[in-house]
Image: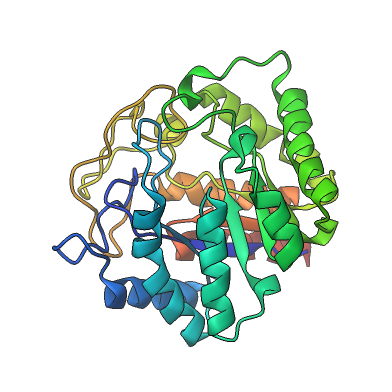
Amino acid sequence: MRTSIMGILNLTPDSFSDGGRFDDGAGSPDVVAAVTEAMRMTQDGAEIIDVGGESTRPGAQPTAVEEEQRRILPVLSELFGCGIRVSVDTRRAATALAALKSADQAGVDPRELIINDVSGLLTDPAMPDLIAETGAQIVITHNRGDSQTMGSLTGYDSLLEDVIQELTGLRDRYLAAGARREQIILDPGIGFSKTHEQNWELVRGLESFVRLGHRVLFGASRKGFLGSVSTPGTSGSRTDASAAGEPGAAGTGAPRSGAAAFGAAHPRDAATAVLSAVAAEAGVWGIRVHDVQGSRDAVQVISKLRS
């Protein structure tokens, strides 16, 4: 199975790596800038664009569902009109439903839409039924808490076994609601309720998730645990290897001040690309990244080695 690249499009003011990139200066999303970036990522090799309107970094404050939808729906409408395949990063069934309605209005088959839900054990009770009823695809992510609590929920008896057990338990809720196996994508939840070392342990165990028989999404792009293997840069990005405001670090904190310029290199992009190759070799279905080109090249190297 060829590994797909999912490009990240955060329409938030406070995401850990790229918050504020698409703010129009008046508190609203700059739709033209966001769509332009999505098109650039597809030209670089992204097959899916993951659109989010709420930061889920450790310490982030919840975003009202109305605000989340205000941020993402105008951009989704344009992306659907451009024929770009979309994933919607949301933990709210109401937002997922609004995105599905937008897709339907644009003539997009709801079965083509992916809902990327990182809520884990706090899954919205309405989400499994919505997925079963609409036929949309769902990314089920392992996570034990929300942005305020996940850093304190890292105790496991046996990390790999516990994560798989909890993740398949979530999957079973969707199957019980009537969702089909082919709708389901599993994500081990790198950076969510995990310490730095636990993240590395899950990377080493990726094949165990692939063997569960579902598509697997891997998302480690620029996360805090990569700071231990990355050379600090000066491109306007925060370089503290233990930065608490970033997924992959236990604790809480604010996002970096200022967003990196469009196309600017991030000090963790090289490490991210290496992990993209590792994940592709393990057989994952998709890789969610900020820097599409670097991970696309890494995945293509693995593909050449296999051919």
Snapshot quadrant of residue 77: bottom left
Q: In the rendered view, how is the structure colored?
A: rainbow
Against 30, residue 205 (above or below) is: above
Residue 72 visible here: yes
Seen from the viewer's position, the closer of residues 20 and 132 is 132
The quadrant in which the N terminus is found is: bottom right
Looking at the image, residue 88 sits to the left or right of residue 178; the answer is left
Seen from the viewer's position, the closer of residues 52 and 294 is 52
Q: Where is residue 173 in the image (x, y as percent from the top left)?
A: 78, 42
Q: Position of residue 63 (x, y in %)?
A: 36, 46
- As drawn, which residue projects farthest toward the left? 25
Looking at the image, residue 2 sits to the left or right of residue 251; the answer is right
**What is the total number of numbered labels drawn onto the structure image?**
0
Q: Position of residue 100 (x, y in %)?
A: 58, 70
Residue 285 visible here: no
Q: What residue lies at 37% left-to-right and 73% top-to-bottom? A: 74
Q: What residue lies at 66% left-to-right and 79% top-to-bottom? A: 109
Against 45, residue 122 (above or below) is: above
Q: Where is residue 8 in the image (x, y as percent from the top left)?
A: 45, 59
The quadrant in which the C terminus is found is: bottom right
Against 269, residue 163 (above or below) is: above
Q: What residue lies at 62% left-to-right and 40% top-to-bottom? A: 123
Against 299, residue 250 (above or below) is: above
Q: What residue lies at 23% left-to-right and 60% top-to-bottom? A: 261
